[in-house]
Image: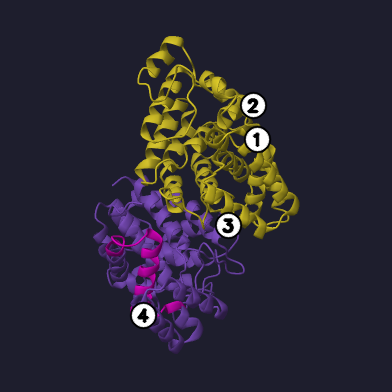
Chain colours: A yellow, B purple
Amino acid sequence: MNPTHIARCAQLAMILEVSASPKPGNVDRDHDFDDTKYEHFLASAIGAGPVLERAAIAQKDMGSFIREAVEESVRWQSGGNTHFGAFLLLVPLVMAAGNGDIKSVTEIVQDTSVEDAVELYKAFQCVDVHVRDVKDLSIDDPNSINELRRRGLMLYDVMRISAGYDAIAHEWISGFQRAFKGASVLEEKLKEMSMNDAIVFTYLTLLSEQPDALVQSKFGMKKAIEVSKRASQMIEKWDLDAIRDFDEELIQEGVNPGSTADIVIGSLFIALLGGVKL
Amino acid sequence: MNPTHIARCAQLAMILEVSASPKPGNVDRDHDFDDTKYEHFLASAIGAGPVLERAAIAQKDMGSFIREAVEESVRWQSGGNTHFGAFLLLVPLVMAAGNGDIKSVTEIVQDTSVEDAVELYKAFQCVDVHVRDVKDLSIDDPNSINELRRRGLMLYDVMRISAGYDAIAHEWISGFQRAFKGASVLEEKLKEMSMNDAIVFTYLTLLSEQPDALVQSKFGMKKAIEVSKRASQMIEKWDLDAIRDFDEELIQEGVNPGSTADIVIGSLFIALLGGVKL
């Protein structure tokens, strides 16, 4: 498949995701965070396009493409971390698409190298990301890169170590299951809903099925489970006003299910690449 | 300047323009038209990226790049005409930027050919555009292409003929004066306003200075002048609630100052290329 087509599907996935509203707790077209605003996400998505296009062609050096995507993202906007988690999903998916079979993402991530892991750690230097540290491999410790090399840890290994508490890492070791599931939900809902509402529905579905990892790491498991239960009620009742209230509530509390939003970007990419039209 | 950078500035210009809200009478992040929705503009802006990148490199065949941009726009979304007028401004500006000097756009448009004019007429076949016909050269008459060739009319000639009533054509023959003016207004306002508000201010300023050509062609000169006077009041008072009311009023009436919005896209492109950051 045409690399420019793949890159544009990725850009549009990021832009449609951040635009979808109300998306409880996260930045959307009507809600900014204090430092990170809607427009920062738009600029980040546009900025990363050419790196993603090159990743679709290259079929190797995944870690450096992730780092370059992060670098371009922060070169195009001053709002800090917008798409770090998204790039960790999109770069492998884009490479799989460039390979002609998006399902091959499962093998592509297993085929990463120690240098890919080193590049990921370099990417962490570019922007302030909220992640739980891998034991003995803190992203803040300059020695971690030597440690990765000493232990011969591939990027896939790092993800396997983190998969218990990191939603993106879990996607890596589970064949991007939730991203593909989200794509199916989205395609199904598009038969009866607008693109905006279908994205909101997909987001709430994924959130209801799995406590958000970012919420869990910031507010603990109890809160993350509570948010997921509320999301579940929202999709049962499907009342946009109620969803708007839920959104306001989470924003007031500073509770942002950002890991779930990242996975929705993966879902949108898969759906757009699969032919979903606007 | 790097063609991928130029193309991304153009994509982002289109996306920021359509996102800016309240933008009286036009599609924005909170207002769809019946057939043409916010998301259609987003997809169109993303879709056109690679054509604009190639235009930045090619430095010739302007007409075919305009046609290709329109074709990509409608291939990526089903909402009809989103960026026809914008591409007529962006393609020459992108080529000038690719040439290393955006001010060279004045010479670049003068240097167009008869084939460029023919390609523009082909572009009109791709999508339903509201324009006043050039006398003896109706866009609906298949014979117009032969007539262009017979009379040896270059794209610049067609624009010169239309410049009295078409705002985009007027930009072509006046060195893109209003687009550059808008870029200065935007940069000035960014010192005191958010990007969103600065775009709204720029839009209202350009609208206040010149009755919108699309409004004039649909509703007559009297209405177009009235809308411009109201825009002038809006920037004097600068009350976002009042601008929101004005927006609702125009949307109810179906009055969309689309030509002014196109020129704002040109302004945003010039400003982003000039280094304006988000």
Q: Which residue is located at x 42 percent, y 19 percent?
A: A115
The circle drawn on residue B77 is 3
Tell me, yes or no, if residue A105 can be seen here: no
Depicted A23 relative to depicted A141: above or below: below
**Foreground label between 3 and 2:** 2
Determine if marks 1 and 2 fall on one subunit.
yes
Per the image, the residue denoted by label 4 is B232
Determine if marks 3 and 2 fall on one subunit.
no
Report how far apart the C-alphas of labels 3 and 2 lie in the structure. Answer: 33 Å
Report how far apart the C-alphas of labels 4 and 1 lie in the structure. Answer: 51 Å
Q: Main secondary structure of the magenta part?
A: helix
Q: Amino acid at mark 3?
A: Gln
Q: Locate residue B194 relative to residue A171 in the image: left or right.
A: left
Label 4 close to label 1 by CB (< 8 Å): no
Q: Quadrant of the N terminus of chain A?
A: top right
Chain for numbered disc 4:
B
Q: Amino acid at mark 2?
A: Ser
Determine if marks 3 and 1 fall on one subunit.
no
Per the image, the residue denoted by label 1 is A178
Question: Which residue range is magenta in the image?
Answer: B187-214
Query: Crowdedness of circle 4 by 10 Å Cα count: few (<14), some, many (20+)?
Result: some
